[in-house]
């Protein structure tokens, strides 16, 4: 039964009533799994399933007047955070359905994204994340009507601990572990590249896991009725790999940490991170083609944060633009390794009216 979708005031981002064959439940989200995503429209007309941080950024963009400093939105941000803590603002509930046979798993209070694909011949789990999350993850898989024993494959976008820590447990259940070639050794040895120290959720632990299959650039990975095309995108880690899926007329990119919503970029604090490789990888994604035909990604499924339900290629291009700026500034001697894209764009005078970009206002 389709539940009535509620709207919010005009100054808010729009809650879409029906999108991609599923109803968005707005503030009254509930019901049986899989839950429908709460879809918000950005100032430029893109439809996203936002984290709290992105929702605040979108609302701030809508409310500020040209010429105001981004900090003028701090009272609004404080109110929205309090609404979220009090349960008056509900944005996500896991597991939720992205499209046919593709589900997002995770925790409502964290921005980590895990994906489950029903291949018709078993389940594929992408980036199963922390050991500490596995009880909840198993529950979400069961809530979707599956048994965890149906998970046949674990596919990593990269080796960092927040994506790979639980590989050993899934392999013990019989799943095959697959990862980009240059990231396989860290998973098998728990070396420094996993960045165990960065994530408190990892509790400083790593259990080595054998890797059953190394993935290479251009590989067509066939899982039942699902074929993923591997795109080697080093820079964040040496073996970072994105995966392209064409399904139900949509071009879908599992982008890991390489390209995230609206230009948010990868953490580059690991000693192995390489800005030059990262920039080249983003250019590769922006110009991605298959069988000689250019592809514009519709749905962007990142390893963290907000999910783009349409116009995902825009986020790839925005991430490329942000990283180009960082690399240029670093080349001039500036010590910079992070740009927050929403306030950065606002500070450049970029506003959106009539869903067209206007600069310098």
Image (tube, rainbow, N blue to C red):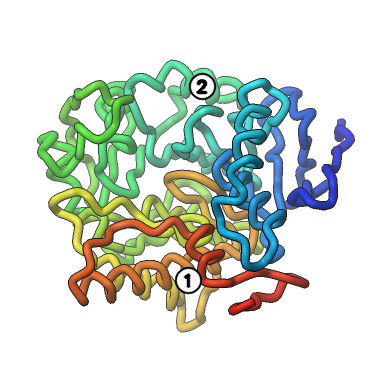
Quadrant for the N terminus, please. Answer: top right
The quadrant holding residue 155 is top left
User: In the image, residue 261 lies at what x, y percent?
Assistant: 51, 56
Q: Is residue 282 left or right of residue 355?
A: left
Front residue of this view, candidates 344 and 288 = 344
Is residue 228 at least partly visible in the picture? no
The quadrant holding residue 296 is bottom right
**Which of the two discs, 2 and 1, labels the residue nearer the N terminus?**
2
User: In the image, residue 122 lies at what x, y percent?
Assistant: 48, 35
**Residue at the (48%, 60%) spot, across then down:** 341
Identify the disc placed on residue 147. Answer: 2
Tell whether label 1 touches label 2 (CB within 8 Å). Answer: no
Residue at image mark 1: 317
Few, some or many residues within 10 Å of mark 2 (<14, 14–19, 20+): some
Q: Is residue 66 above or below residue 122?
A: below
Front residue of this view, candidates 324 and 218 = 324
**Residue at the (68%, 22%) spot, across then down:** 87
The residues tagged by marks 2 and 1 sit, at their Cα atoms, a distance apart of: 38 Å
Q: Is residue 115 above or below residue 254?
A: above
**Residue at the (46%, 28%) spot, across then down:** 150
- Mark 2 lies on a secondary structure that is loop
User: In the image, residue 128 lies at what x, y percent?
Assistant: 38, 33
Nearer to us: label 2 or label 1:
1
């Amino acid at each position: 039964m389709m539940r009535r979708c509620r709207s919010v005031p005009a100054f808010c981002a729009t809650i879409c009533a029906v999108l991609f064959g599923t109803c968005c439940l707005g503030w009254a989200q509930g019901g049986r799994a899989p839950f429908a995503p709460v879809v918000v429209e950005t100032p430029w007309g893109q439809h996203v399933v936002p984290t709290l941080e992105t929702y605040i950024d979108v609302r701030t963009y809508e409310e500020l007047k040209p010429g105001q400093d981004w900090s003028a939105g701090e009272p609004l941000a404080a109110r929205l955070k309090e609404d979220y803590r009090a349960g008056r603002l509900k944005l996500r509930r896991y597991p939720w359905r992205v499209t046919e046979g593709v589900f997002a798993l995770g925790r409502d209070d964290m921005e980590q994204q895990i994906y489950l694909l029903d291949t018709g011949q078993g389940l594929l789990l992408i980036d199963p994340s922390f050991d500490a999350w596995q009880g909840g993850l198993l529950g979400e898989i069961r809530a979707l009507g599956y048994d965890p024993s149906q998970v046949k494959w674990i596919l990593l976008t990269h080796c960092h601990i927040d994506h790979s820590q639980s590989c050993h447990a899934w392999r013990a259940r019989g799943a095959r572990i697959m990862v980009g070639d240059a990231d396989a050794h860290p998973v098998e040895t728990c070396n420094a590249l996993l960045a165990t120290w960065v994530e408190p959720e990892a509790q400083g632990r790593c259990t080595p896991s054998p890797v059953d299959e190394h993935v290479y650039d251009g590989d067509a990975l066939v899982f039942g009725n699902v074929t993923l095309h591997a795109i080697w995108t080093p820079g964040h880690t040496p073996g970072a790999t994105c995966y392209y899926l064409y399904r139900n007329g949509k071009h879908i990119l599992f982008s890991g940490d390489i390209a995230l919503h609206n230009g948010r970029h990868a953490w580059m604090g690991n000693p192995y991170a390489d800005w030059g490789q990262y920039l080249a990888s983003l250019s590769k994604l922006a110009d991605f083609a298959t069988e000689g035909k250019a592809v514009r990604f519709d749905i962007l499924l990142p390893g963290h944060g907000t999910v783009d339900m349409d116009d995902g290629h825009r986020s790839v291009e925005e991430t490329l633009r942000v990283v180009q700026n960082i690399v240029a500034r670093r080349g001039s001697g500036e010590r910079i390794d992070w740009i927050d894209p929403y306030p950065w764009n606002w500070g450049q005078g970029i506003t959106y009216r009539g869903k067209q970009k206007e600069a310098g206002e």
